[in-house]
């Protein structure tokens, strides 16, 4: 378990992290979410002791986190860093050696991961000869080669096409099934929504929402429906029951007043237009993210 209590980090007069607290439970994917520049990476670097906290405490498995724990932590930084003129296998063995793996074990683990991620053919190629996506895979292997129990991924999907994004998602889920604990830092809400159970949303260094994603959605509220229909959406402006709506190619997401019963609204609307889809929907994490960030920035 990782516990962060009242974490503060200042850079001279700039308050980058402002009294943030959260707990990451064993075997879960915890989402550290926020827009670019929110303080996510600074928080991570403070946890890793790359940066010294101004105040606050970081507890890992019941004790203040120290260097002795870093061999059981894997870190994928947002700013990737590989030795581009070195061979893939040499780079991976080097990173493994930093985590106290023997040369033999490092080589075996590197080969195993290269095969698992379908890039073994590049084993003896220089990093600079690989595509950006395959370089990202090498960086990922470097972060996990020592079989850490706590994984911290800072924007792990950057640089991947949809196929490789899915491969990384599947890999992250496999780590959870193995009992590993994961901190996922990202501003890609669609991916976070699919992976995370608990989240902390930060903006300008401050926590603006935290807890189980299901509870956050429930507390966010809104009487929301999705309506599919033939024709344009101009008719929606006639209904006083509607607070607002967003329209797409063949449907609209509609927020009704809290006092409106969706089924009764449906009866009323089918008198006006042909309806081909109707469902009650919960707000997406992306919608919650946008609303809360706007509110916290006002």
Image (cartoon, rainbow, N blue to C red):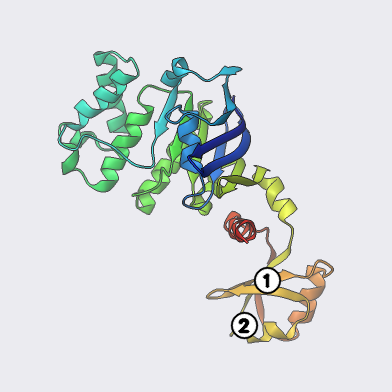
Label 2 crowd bin: few (<14), some (14–19), many (20+), radius 10 Å: some
The residue located at (61%, 38%) in the rendering is: 20
Q: Quadrant location of residue 85?
A: top left
Q: Quadrant location of residue 134?
A: top left
Q: Which residue is mark 1?
A: 254
In the image, 231: left or right of 215?
Answer: left
Can you see residue 273?
no
Indicate the position of residue 252 as horizontal and vertical percent values: 62, 73
Relative to 176, say whether 211 is above or below: below
SS of the residue under disc 2: loop
The residue located at (79%, 80%) in the rendering is: 268
Q: Nearer the viewer, residue 225 or 291?
A: 291
Relative to 282, say whether 66 is above or below: above
Relative to 91, say whether 265 is above or below: below
Q: Earlier in the sequence, mark 2 or mark 1?
A: 2
The residue located at (51%, 27%) in the rendering is: 180
* Furthest residue in direction front, as rendered: 13
The residue located at (69%, 65%) in the rendering is: 279
In the rendered structure, find residue 233 and report the number of the disc placed on it: 2
Label 1 crowd bin: few (<14), some (14–19), many (20+), radius 10 Å: many
């Amino acid at each position: 378990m990782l516990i962060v209590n009242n974490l503060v980090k200042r850079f001279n007069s700039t308050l980058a992290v402002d009294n943030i607290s959260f707990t990451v439970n064993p075997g879960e994917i915890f989402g550290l979410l926020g827009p670019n520049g929110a303080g996510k990476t600074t928080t991570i670097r403070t946890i890793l002791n790359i940066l010294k906290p101004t105040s606050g405490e970081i507890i890992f498995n019941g004790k203040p986190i120290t260097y002795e724990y870093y061999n059981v932590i894997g870190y994928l930084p947002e700013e990737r860093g590989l030795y581009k003129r070195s061979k893939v296998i040499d780079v991976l063995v080097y990173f493994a050696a930093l985590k106290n793996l023997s040369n033999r074990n490092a080589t075996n683990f590197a080969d195993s991961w290269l095969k698992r991620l379908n890039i073994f053919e590049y084993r003896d190629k220089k990093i600079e000869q690989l595509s950006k996506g395959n370089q990202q895979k090498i960086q990922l292997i470097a972060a996990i080669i020592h079989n850490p129990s706590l994984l911290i991924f800072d924007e792990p999907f950057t640089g991947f096409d949809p196929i490789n994004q899915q491969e990384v998602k599947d890999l992250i889920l496999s780590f959870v099934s193995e009992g590993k604990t994961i901190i996922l830092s990202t501003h890609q809400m669609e991916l976070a929504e699919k992976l995370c159970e608990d989240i902390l949303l930060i903006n300008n260094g401050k926590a603006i929402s935290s807890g189980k994603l299901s509870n956050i959605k429930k507390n966010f509220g809104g009487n929301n429906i999705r309506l599919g229909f033939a024709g344009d959406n101009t008719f929606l402006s006639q209904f006083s029951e509607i607070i607002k709506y967003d329209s797409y190619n063949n449907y609209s997401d509609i927020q009704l007043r809290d006092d409106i019963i969706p089924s009764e609204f449906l009866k009323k609307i089918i008198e006006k237009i042909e309806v081909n889809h109707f469902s009650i929907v919960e707000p997406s994490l992306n919608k919650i993210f946008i609303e809360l960030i706007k509110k916290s920035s006002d």
